Image (cartoon, coloured by chain):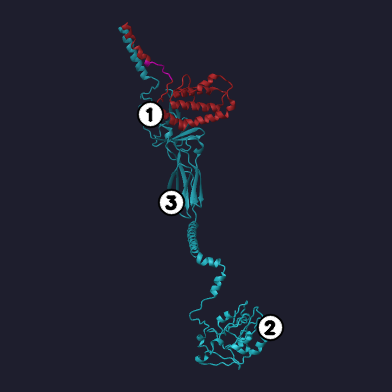
Amino acid sequence: VLRMTQLSTVLSILAMFLHTTFGESGCTSADGDGTLGDDEPDNFDIDCFSQLEIKDSFSSLTCNFTELPPHNTNYTLSLCTKEDNNYMCYNMKKQEDAYFLQFTDLLSKTDICMFSEIKRRVCRSLVVTDIVKPEAPFAINITYQREANEYLICYHTPHSSKKYLKDKLIHQIAYRQKEGTWKTIESPYLQIKLLGKSLENDASYEVRVRSQPNGDYFKGTWSEWSTSQTFRTARQQHSTENYSSVVVIILSTLGFMLCIAIIALIIIFWENRIKPAVWPNLPDHKKTLEQLCKKPKNSFDISFNPESFGHVHIHKVDGIRAKAELENFLQPSTAPEISLPEKSRNGSDLKMIPAKTDNSNLSLSVTYGGVWPAEALHRLLGTGQFAGTEGNCSSSMYEVCHGTRVPLHSGGSSLCSAPPFHPPGQLSPEPRNDDIVSQMLPDSEMRSPNNEEAYVTMSSFYKIQ
Amino acid sequence: NPVFFRSTLPVLPLLLILPPVNSSSCAMENKTTEIRVKYENILSHDINELVNISAENRDRCWKNKNRENIKVFFCNDTQEIESLQSMACNMLRFFRKERISKAFRWKAAFVACGTLQVLQCKCEGHKKEK
């Protein structure tokens, strides 16, 4: 029993030792950590990059020695993967100074190994998704947007139609003036805009683009630069356009303010000035007559008081020539309207057309330079007494406005006016014949001896009526 | 018999130590984040291509209506990784089916190998074609 116990213990220890040694890894390396390689350190400097989907679904690996190994040493670079306890290595093809290999597996853990005659094998871990070098962009197109004064730069990348790096790249756009320093802009998109104000006018510029993985999962280096594209910026006329636009803005502002001012003026002066001129009010007959019948000035001497005419020279008129004509006018026929001639006449040229029997409109114009005698007046009117008579004056009318020579029409109103008088300033020198005696009498002598006989007052007219 | 018990006691550790060496256990059981990242950035694109190829060859479906073949692509709940492993391994079996188009077979094999690589699983009984 003791021996059996000891035997089982030994077997269990042996089994544990074997399991630990072999296990599932099946690795026979001396490292014991499951990696390739001998105990020799990875003392070779090599620079590699991968290009995904370079040809259909195949990816590529390109490696260069940073430190060339001795020329007389044959060496081989291989990409090795661990597979089922075995390492499967794929030799890279030498192309000039680089080593190239196509592969498809991006998920397996790979190592880059160098096989040389001196050293058995030297390996180093390599993650192909961390050394991705995208393909260079192409087809750069530059469009000038005049309205916005911007330059739209569009470009393409081969990875837009592929699987792994689509929308996972960041692009760097470099531009410079002719032989100037490069300026760079980074963008994840396939287009970018340059402001025109940041560029010189009428100058030549050069643009180029390159790409790099954005680092979310794929990492790597910048691609090669694309083919450069040149463009020329707009000329000075754009600044002129800016100037003209500023002028337009200023003029528009001034015009707007002018319109505001005009509208304000219209509103202010509408009632007082504009409306009466544009839409005059129809004259009111009452107001019009009131305006015509203006109040006399204080200095205007209107009075039928004989005493107020004391300063007026009274010319006595005797043997007035108009008597013969007067008789003619005393005919009962309707007297026509006679307008006074413009030229003034003396009392001998008096023409009167009394319409004694006709109460129709009578136009009688009289012109003389003296004082109507009462007798002549009576004869004219066909009445015995001038004063106090009624009805006779109603049908007659005569002008007493010597100065204006304007015939008066009457619609039946009785008007026996006083002898005419010359308004101040309107007295016109009239030629006087021999029948007219003009006497310059003193004021005291010129006063009418009988006021009632020489003057006809308005009150007498009312009495006549 | 205590003597018998003491003699057989070391055998128990042997049972734990000596399980089948070639068991297909996946090493990415608790690494779901890494699995998801690799799937989103690499494996999903290949699966989409495989789906497109199968859509183009829809009229060429198998006339063999053996229902056992349908079960090879089922996903068991709470056993996603084991299900994916099973599906990948089953998909590799079709690589040698000459009735299936070559492009589809190659793509299917590529997806299957990629799945096993992401999960770090192995299949039993056959080798993965490179």
Say few, some or many: other residues with alpha carbon within 10 Å of mark 1 (under 14 / 14 to 19 / 20 or more).
Answer: few
Point out the tag, 2 or 1, that comes first from the N-terminus: 1
Closest to the observer: A142 or A64? A142
Q: Are marks 2 and 1 in contact (CB under 8 Å)?
A: no
Q: Colour of chain B?
A: red
Q: Which chain is cyan?
A: A
Q: CA distance from mark 2 to mark 1?
A: 168 Å
Give whichever of B15, A340 is nearer the camera: A340
Q: Are discs 2 and 3 located on one and the same chain?
A: yes
Q: Is residue A269 magenta?
A: no
Marks 3, 1 in one chain: yes
Task: Please give the residue where the numbered disc 1 appears in the rendered image.
Answer: A119
Residue A272 in the image, given as x and y percentages of width and height: 50, 66
Amino acid residing under circle 1? Lys
Q: Which residue is mark 3?
A: A180
Co-location on one chain, circles 2 and 1: yes
User: Does residue A110 appear in the picture of this structure?
Assistant: no
Q: Are marks 3 and 1 in contact (CB under 8 Å)?
A: no
Q: Secondary structure at mark 1?
A: loop
Question: Which residue is disc 2 drawn over?
Answer: A332
| Region in magenta | B16-23
